[in-house]
């Protein structure tokens, strides 16, 4: 498995440098307050947010195939890690927290590494947009509720919604109005600036103003909390304390965070990639996330994730490659080495306002509104996932959301749209009887459309729909399976049972309009008999013709003379005329030849053998040829049969489809040597060969006059057939050519 390093920097263009440099510096500046805030949410001192913004994003850039996406300390992993501490009763910022969080980050990286080797990137497609949107929104709202008490002058909350509301109430009893003024003012400026100046880095200005408020106005003297001072210096490497924590709990939370990181990162990356016209490698993105989290653990920091907000900023400033991430990491190193002292002057409510402002963009308000308008079921799934996170926590939120997503799929698939079809006088095609006022059922016929795949959960509905809507005069049931692409064994048994039930009532059964791949499934599920018996047809029209009806198909409640008049009007409008066929002759010939052929529509364009039998087409045609050859002596008066009589019987083959019929005839000629055992005189062989050639010539002339396009296909098909016959059986093909020269002289 080949892995290239810094893949987005290949073929780097010098014109990218300016934008990448600017975007990287701005992202580093904005990351200072955001990453410090999220580090505190995870239970670590704020400085570890800066540590998590150096090596982790460098290691992500090392493997990432996304030129835009930015990695770093982010909301969802921080919230889950912080919740893990709260559940264990570990105080944020304590020695135990400093041990526990890096171990979780390590497990996150290891789980992601396992996902990479398992190539699990495609699993993200099983997490629906409503579930992911509700989950992320629930986490964002949870963090906002955790952060609000810090604006009020208290400490951050913990737990689920009831605990957070209780803590909020208790903090309000001892509110610090100076702190509230700073926090609310900063938040108001940030919200307004996003609308007025969306590209301006107002968070950096707010951070600078916050420091000024401390240096000039000494807001800390009025009870406003400040960030802890950060000692200058780069992060130190540590060995995660895997033997001093509950490994089972840490591995479990690590798995949850790994799933969230993989899902949120890949979904977001693919969204940016689609919007900006490039492609990413999902599996390599998982590797990049794994590398970022493992190195974060060895610097003592928290789990890290792809950042939607910082990536959006990168897009705004025109960043082109992962050189943006490299620039951001170097800028953060400069801050840690030369500007760390200024961090201790930042008021907590100002930092909290910046975090809340960023989180407000994470809440999927627009998605909720859109779902409410277009899909109430998915809206309820969104709300349920969000509420589950708020009331039960992140783990149960994901589980409940995914369960709801699968429940929605099952409900949709077990009760799919269905319709009964009919015809409209004077018009081609078949129409939903409920939605078209002028549509009428075809006499003695039920046409049923099922708009979903057939499987164990909906096959009974399929059967009941048909059986419960049969009429006393129903003679034919036709299933429009155009949207059915797969069936399981339960559905297969249901179809066979339905066919048997209909046969007992004297009702013919057809399945039509589906793709060829479904025929392969029929054969694999031991349903090939349906194809052999002619129950599988390519079109509804072919099934109707095979059932004995003729165009224009008689409609219930419409007089026959009116239909014929409308049909004549349609034909005079420039449509092709319809040729009727003798169905009685077809059935008689089938019995005489022991041939279970698949009659096609009168236009002879379907080539149903190839469609119905797929890879077994040649074998099936050969099987039919051998049946004819082996049973020629059953033809009436074979010894005395006249040229005219044999020609008449051969002409009945026109219902096989012109191109298919031509191939069957040619293959019969290939096996004429086998006639010696069945026929007493070579004269009969010569007669049959001449009649076959006459029929093939008649096909060609007829198609050339009436349908030049199909004639061209016939000529091309004959060329391909000769090459196939030569390849499949060169000896027999050579004898056929010799016989052809001899008998046609």
Image: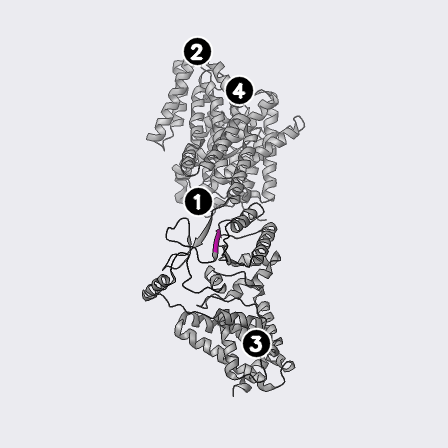
**Mark in the foreground, 1 or 3:** 3
Q: Are marks 1 and 3 in contact (CB under 8 Å)?
A: no
Coordinates of residue 335 in the picture (x, y in percent):
47, 27
Give the residues drawn in magenta, as a range: 446-453
Q: Which mark is residue 265?
A: none
Picture layout, residue 742 above or below residue 146: below
Position of residue 554 relative to residue 710, above or below, is above
In this view, the mark in front (4 or 1): 4
**Residue, disc 1:** 274
Front position among marks 1 and 2: 1
- First in sequence: mark 2 vs mark 4: 4
- Is residue 333 visible to the viewer in this orientation of the structure? no
Say what secondary structure mark 2 lies in.
Answer: helix
Crowd around label 4: few <14 · some 14–19 · many ≥20 (10 Å): some
Residue at image position (37%, 58%) is 425
The label nearer to you, 4 versus 3, is 3
Query: In the rendered structure, which disc, 1 or 3, sits on the residue that comes first in sequence?
Result: 1
Q: Which residue is mark 4?
A: 163
- On the image, numbered disc 2 is attached to which residue? 221
Q: Quadrant of residue 22?
A: top left
Q: How many numbered badges does the structure rendering display?
A: 4
């Amino acid at each position: 498995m080949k892995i290239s390093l810094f893949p987005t920097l290949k073929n780097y263009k010098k014109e990218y440098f300016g934008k990448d440099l600017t975007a990287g510096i701005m992202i580093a500046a904005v990351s200072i307050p955001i990453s410090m805030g999220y580090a505190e949410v995870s239970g670590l001192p704020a400085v570890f947010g800066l540590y998590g913004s150096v090596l982790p994003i460098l290691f992500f850039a090392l493997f990432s195939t996304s030129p835009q996406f930015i990695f770093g300390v982010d909301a969802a992993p921080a919230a889950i890690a912080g919740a893990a501490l709260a559940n264990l009763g570990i105080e944020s910022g304590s020695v135990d927290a400093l041990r526990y969080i890096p171990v979780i980050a390590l497990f996150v990286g290891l789980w992601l590494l396992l996902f990479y080797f398992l190539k699990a990137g495609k699993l993200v497609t099983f997490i629906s947009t409503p579930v992911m949107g509700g989950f992320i929104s629930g986490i964002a709202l949870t963090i906002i509720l955790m952060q609000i008490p810090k604006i009020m002058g208290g400490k951050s909350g913990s737990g689920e919604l009831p605990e957070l509301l209780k803590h909020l109430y208790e903090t309000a009893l001892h509110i610090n109005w100076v702190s509230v003024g700073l926090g609310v003012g900063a938040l108001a400026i940030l919200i307004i600036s996003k609308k007025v100046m969306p590209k301006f880095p107002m968070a950096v200005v707010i951070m600078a103003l916050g420091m000024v408020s401390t240096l000039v106005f000494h807001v800390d003297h009025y009870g406003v909390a400040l960030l802890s001072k950060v000692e200058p210096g780069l992060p130190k490497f540590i060995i995660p304390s895997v033997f001093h924590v509950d490994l089972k709990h840490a591995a479990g939370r690590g798995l949850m965070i790994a799933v969230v990181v993989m899902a949120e990162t890949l979904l977001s990356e693919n969204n940016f990639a689609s919007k900006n016209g490039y492609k990413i490698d999902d599996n390599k993105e998982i590797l990049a996330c794994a590398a970022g989290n493992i190195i974060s653990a060895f610097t003592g920091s928290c789990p890290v994730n792809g950042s939607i907000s910082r990536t959006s900023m990168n897009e705004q400033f025109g960043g082109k490659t992962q050189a943006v991430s490299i620039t951001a990491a170097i800028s953060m190193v400069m801050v840690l080495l030369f500007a760390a002292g200024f961090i201790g002057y930042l008021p907590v409510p100002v930092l909290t306002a910046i975090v809340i402002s960023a989180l407000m963009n994470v809440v999927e308000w627009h998605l909720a509104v859109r779902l409410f308008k277009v899909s109430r079921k998915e809206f309820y799934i969104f709300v349920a996932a969000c509420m589950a996170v708020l009331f039960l926590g992140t783990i149960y939120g994901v589980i409940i959301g995914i369960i709801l997503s699968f429940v929605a799929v099952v409900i949709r698939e077990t009760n799919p749209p269905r319709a009964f079809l009919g015809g409209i006088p004077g018009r081609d095609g078949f129409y939903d009887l409920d939605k078209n006022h002028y549509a009428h059922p075809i006499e003695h016929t039920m046409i049923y459309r099922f708009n979903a795949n057939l499987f164990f959960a909906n096959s009974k509905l399929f059967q009941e729909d048909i059986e419960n809507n049969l009429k006393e005069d129903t003679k034919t049931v036709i299933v429009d399976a155009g949207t059915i692409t797969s069936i399981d064994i339960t559905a297969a048994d249901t179809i066979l049972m339905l066919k048997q039930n209909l046969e007992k009532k004297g009702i013919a059964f057809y399945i039509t309009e589906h793709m060829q791949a479904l025929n392969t499934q029929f054969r694999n599920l031991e349903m090939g008999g349906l194809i052999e018996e002619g129950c599988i047809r390519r079109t509804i029209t072919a099934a109707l013709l095979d059932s004995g009806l003729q165009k224009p198909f008689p409609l219930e409640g419409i007089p026959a003379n009116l239909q014929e008049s409308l049909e004549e009007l349609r034909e005079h409008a420039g449509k092709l005329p319809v040729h009727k066929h003798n169905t009685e002759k077809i059935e008689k010939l089938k019995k005489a030849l022991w041939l279970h052929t698949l009659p096609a529509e009168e236009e002879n364009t379907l080539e149903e053998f190839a469609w119905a039998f797929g890879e077994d087409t040649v074998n099936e045609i050969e099987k039919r040829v051998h049946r004819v050859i082996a049973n020629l002596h059953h033809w009436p008066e074979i010894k005395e049969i006249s040229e005219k009589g044999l020609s008449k019987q051969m002409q009945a083959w026109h219902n096989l489809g012109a191109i298919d019929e031509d191939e069957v005839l040619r293959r019969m000629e290939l096996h004429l040597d086998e006639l010696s055992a069945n026929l007493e005189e070579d004269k009969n062989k010569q007669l049959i060969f001449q009649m076959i050639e006459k029929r093939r010539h008649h096909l060609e002339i007829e198609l050339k006059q009436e349908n030049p396009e199909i004639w061209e296909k016939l000529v091309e098909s004959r060329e391909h057939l000769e090459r196939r016959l030569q390849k499949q059986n060169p000896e027999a093909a050579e004898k056929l050519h010799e016989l052809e020269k001899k008998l046609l002289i």
